Image (cartoon, rainbow, N blue to C red):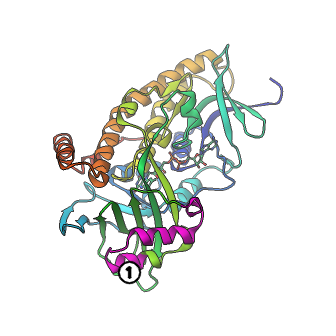
Amino acid sequence: MEGVEEMEIVIVGGGICGLATALALHRKGIASVILERSESLRATGGGIAVHTNGWRALEQLGIASELRQTALTLQLARTIWLDSGKQQESPVSEGEARCVERSKLVELLAAHLPVGTIRFGCHIISIKLDAHTSTPILDMHDGSIIKAKIVIGCDGGNSVIGDFLELKPPKLLSACAVRGFTNYPNGHGFAPEYIRQKKGQVLLGRSPVNDTLVFWFVVPQVYPQDSNVWKDPKLIRQFALELTEGFPTEMTEMINGSDENSLSLTHLRYREPWDVLLGRFRKGSVTVAGDAMHIMGPFLGQGGSASVEDAVVLARCLAPKLREVNLETNGREMTVVQKVGEALDAYVKERRMRLVWLSTQTYLMGKLLLDSSLLPVKLLTLVVVLALFRDPVGHSRYDCGRL
Ligand SMILES: Cc1cc2nc3c(=O)[nH]c(=O)nc-3n(C[C@H](O)[C@H](O)[C@H](O)COP(=O)(O)OP(=O)(O)OC[C@H]3O[C@@H](n4cnc5c(N)ncnc54)[C@H](O)[C@@H]3O)c2cc1C
């Protein structure tokens, strides 16, 4: 085809998952190209909890020790219901939990990629399979076309690749999230604890990143009335302060003193656990990973780590099959699609139940933390949580294995 660019492996989206997937492939000696619609790395979005399972996956990518130096270890999770005064202490993770700056993680992943792996300003608008060879064909926003042998959709919750796979669109939670960082130049003095405070319909969380930086979030069960709030950091802070009226002063002072550039307001969306169980995550040589596959609420803090696990498993499954077919020269297109299809099926099979359990636990945790349903419904949810997840930090014990 004239005017069509041909590529081997295309990763759509350069967020945590796309970057981790490219790095995992690179570590296996496989080149890929990330097509990212933004003009630069999207490093916004505050802090991100990384549990033991996430550190294991990051170790496989070779960036864990560098990232560890940026964040302290969290010792404990403390949940406080301010209305009743009830408090609960629990481990944050099975072993190691830290709250890292998302920007640090994203920049580190990108820094370890070969130069030229990421192409910015590349917005994919649709994808189809060639009628004869089943090779994926990507239509770009600028009118250009890319023909790729393998496409991995890491394009987040609103995934074009997910649409192509006919995945059900993620659902909106009846809550949004304000996120921000506050810097205390002389030290914050807070214990290395992940604190969650609940008052009325508002959940407020705080986690130290290092001795001077604190990440916080506010999750209310309302959306701002004024649509300008979504875009304007000053209004976002004002919104967060209004929501947290009556919370302890050290919390409201923290929000008041936050770094304006760090503030964001996000819709919370999730793929229902049964859609993760039943979703078709592979068509031809096209698959999805990260939020495009399993977007979940923030209640376990596992979406990002699960994305890195996806990357490790995907590269591990693909590498041996790619050795069987010579993609560069004499691999016939049908054979490539078939062999790659087998590898992608193995990846989906390995990931599916892990993701079903994570999505289910996140969903139920969200229900317990946010839900305003009647007491019997809450009690029933609690019984289900206790029955299915007797070990509340069992999710962090998972080991995605070697790359
Ligand atoms: C409030 C909140 C708190 C969270 N807290 C945690 C936490 O503590 N721990 C944790 O592990 N996870 C957490 N998560 C989840 C975590 O942020 C996500 O799971 C993770 O960022 C997913 O990464 P991703 O790369 O799959 O998707 P994204 O980060 O959404 O990246 C997708 C990328 O694809 C690009 N893109 C999209 N469409 C196209 C297209 N058509 N063409 C080209 N490029 C495209 C986008 O520009 C973007 O760069 C939280 C999420 C939220 C909302």
Q: For mark 1, give the secondary structure.
A: loop
Which residue is at a point 51% across and 46% down the rendered structure image?
Answer: 17
Which residue is at a point 65% across and 25% down the rendered structure image?
Answer: 128
Question: Does 251 appear in magenta?
Answer: yes
Is 291 displayed left or right of 79 in the figure?
right
Is 377 displayed left or right of 238 in the figure?
left
Residue 248 pos. (x, y %): 31, 77
> Which portion, as a residue range, is magenta?
226-254
Q: Which residue is mark 1?
A: 188
Is disc 1 surrounded by few (<14), some (14 to 19) or many (20+) residues within 10 Å? some
Residue 140 pos. (x, y %): 72, 37
Examine the rendering and report whether any part of residue 52 can be seen: yes
Residue 25 pos. (x, y %): 54, 40
Is 399 displayed left or right of 5 in the figure?
left
Q: Quadrant of residue 79?
A: bottom left
**Can you tell me whether the CB of the residue at mark 1 lies under 8 Å from the nearest atom of ligand 1?**
no
The amino acid type of the residue labelled 1 equals His
| Quadrant of the image containing the C terminus | top left
Which residue is at a point 63% across and 49% down the rendered structure image?
Answer: 114
